[in-house]
Image (tube, helix red, strand yellow):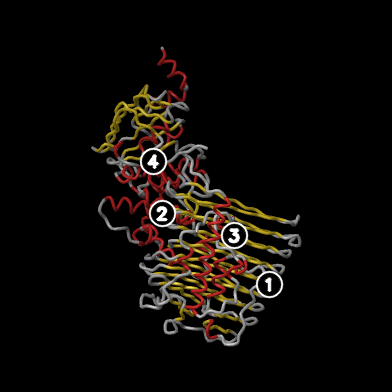
Amino acid sequence: MDAAKPQLMDRPKAEAQHAASEASGAALVSALDAVLGVQADVALDAVPVPHRRVERWKYTPVAAWWKDVLAPDVSTVADAGCEANPVPGLDAYRLVFVNGTFDAAASDLPVHTGVTCMPLSQRGDAKLQDVDAFSPEVSDWFAGLNGRYSQEGLYLRVTQGVELDRPILIHHHTCGAGAFNVLRHDIAVALNASVKIVQWSTATAGADGSVNILTRADVGQGARLHIDKVQDEEGTVRHIAFEDIRQGRASHAEVHTITVRGAWVRNDLAFRINGQGAHAELNGAFLPGEGEFVDNHTTVDHRVAHCTSSENYKGILYGKSTGVFNGKVFVRPDAQQTNAYQQNANILASEKASMNAKPELEIYADDVKCSHGCTVGQFDSDALFYARSRGVGLEAAKAMLVHAFIGDILKGFAVTEVRLEVEHRLAEKHGWDVWNDHPNDDA
Amino acid sequence: MLKINALKASVEEASILKGLSLTINPGEVHAIMGPNGSGKSTLASVLAGREEYEIEGGSVDFDGADLLDMDATERARAGLFLAFQYPVEIPGVSNINFIRAAVNGKREHEGLEPIKGKAFLDMVKEKAQLVELDGRLRNRSVNEGFSGGEKKRNEIFQMAMLEPKLAILDETDSGLDIDALRIVSDGVNAMRSPERSFLVITHYQRLLDYIVPDFVHVLVDGRIVRSGGKELALELEDKGYDWIKEDIVA
């Protein structure tokens, strides 16, 4: 064998090492159970710790740090570093969670006929939705961790025909060392009801540890759920988020995700379309900077006929950053007349950045319309030269192209104030003065 | 204003400009004509700072500064403007934001504050009238879905907004019908002044009926082979480029 080539570890040896590592992980789990007083009712050991030989984790290595997640500093709790409202000017109901704890003083819960909204810990006898065979908890170790340790989150029920007048802002804030910010949001929107949710995640500059958020939503017949999801975390927290969305007949569900900042982020979305005439929409943009890692895994499962889904993810990768996109679309045998669209476009803004993109379409019905496209490229040099020949600086010209590139993603946000704040934060992160030019603003 | 001395340039190892010299004084309008492939558009691109072109020799002095030492942005801010033969479409960037960024780039260079919204919009209104640019085109994406004539009018509109010292028009007449040609030419003529110079690159004499040049140069195989007054253009129209080529060989 060529000695200059890096040698792959042989498989039996790697398996053995991984098994030993898992065994020490099990000991950490029991220790954590004891510290947090958790009854081990979720069989975590049924799900293997992710490793790179599993397709879903091929480009997302966790071997170096997954054990750290199991050994948090449990004394890390709420501090004063939390912004009261991350979105200026937003008129919304608010639930603030700091390091997994509900901050009642900073929150403003809706009092609205037909709406039950409270922190999960105060729900009393109210039941959560069932974890079933398709829930992420049974197939993903991090989701299993969430199932075992999440004790707090949003509990929301919107009854038949009710349209909540304002969006609900869920603010997840992480601070301090060794944080263990585990939350579960349990949402059910009944017949013809409608709600808009904004999930906003922040972390302080010194924060490390893990953030693990699982959102389970049941979108009933004719109901509408719209989630704007913003991730803007400083520090070095590892953030993993699951959306487990179940859709009924003629329902409409949208999740728009933007990762402004984050040392390590993985989003795992799954839409199960169980009722005819339903529409699922999932869009996202990610702009990782030097050293940042962003992974978007999505699944759209068309189980019945006459449904549509539309997916559009865009990445712009700076510095030595890494992006992952994996888009699964299942069209099951009964899902005739499905119309599914998927697009993933990426710009490598640096020679050191890398992007791993994989569309996966599995189509078992014959009368369907499914399209997908995936591109990885650079900035359009003709457009850059055109702008520069008008006296626009190179960086400003690139910023203009970025704004145009992710413009359709930003426009998808349900809440205008969220979009404006996201634009502001992106401009601040990347130094894009040109974004702040709105010619009609001060006219 | 502009002094090009023995300029040599190549692209992908193919030599295009082979020692081109040209001097343009303030207020003058020069036309460059020539057959296809003679290097007309290369000259425009090289002067505007397109990086794909390799400069292999010669010098270009622009208003006392070394033009070849500046990047494309700096050249534009120093007062050089190129009206593109094929204006670039930039989906998602509104025409008005684009020109605002350009105006503010120039103002930054001059040590001025970014332009105020009201002043900017007044300026847009005034300059758009010059080329009869439809108001709805201002808010559309840059050149996206514009007709050939609209794109060229947009180029002249941008030129009017930036008020350059030297404007290079690269085959601005291509793809224009007679009405659009008149509108574009009127816009250019309205901007002629004793301080501003133009370099008009064209394949056909027709444009020069509308924008009357002080000098006409014929570019063949990367060199200017003949210069004269505006009557030279008529002679070319009459006899074709082969006449000049034969003349050179002979």
Q: Tell which tag, 1 or 4, sits nearer the viewer.
A: 1
Q: Tell which tag, 1 or 2, sits nearer the viewer.
A: 1
Query: Looking at the picture, which amino acid does disc 4 mark?
Result: Leu
- Label 3: few (<14), some (14–19) or many (≥20) C-alpha neighbours in 10 Å: many
Q: Secondary structure at mark 1?
A: loop
Q: Secondary structure at mark 3?
A: strand
- Label 2: few (<14), some (14–19) or many (≥20) C-alpha neighbours in 10 Å: some
Q: Secondary structure at mark 2?
A: helix
Judging by the rendered image, the residue that carries numbered circle 3 is A311
Q: Do the residues at discs 4 and 2 belong to one chain?
A: no
Query: Looking at the picture, which amino acid does disc 2 mark?
Result: Ala
Which label was assigned to residue A399?
Answer: 2
Chain at tag 4: B
Left or right, residue B18 beside residue A210: left
**Badge 1 or badge 2: first in the primary sequence:** 1
Q: Residue at x 39, y 42 (%)?
A: B188
Residue farthest toward the top in the current orientation of the protein: B250
Marks 2/3 in contact by CB < 8 Å: the verdict is no
Judging by the rendered image, the residue that carries numbered circle 4 is B82
- Cα–Cα span, label 1 and label 3: 19 Å
- Cα–Cα span, label 2 and label 3: 24 Å
Q: Position of residue B231 (x, y in %)?
A: 39, 26
Chain at tag 2: A
Q: Position of residue B70 (x, y in %)?
A: 30, 40
Q: Nearer the viewer, residue B79 or A292?
A: A292
Q: Do the residues at discs 4 and 3 belong to one chain?
A: no
**Quadrant of image for the C terminus of chain A:** bottom left
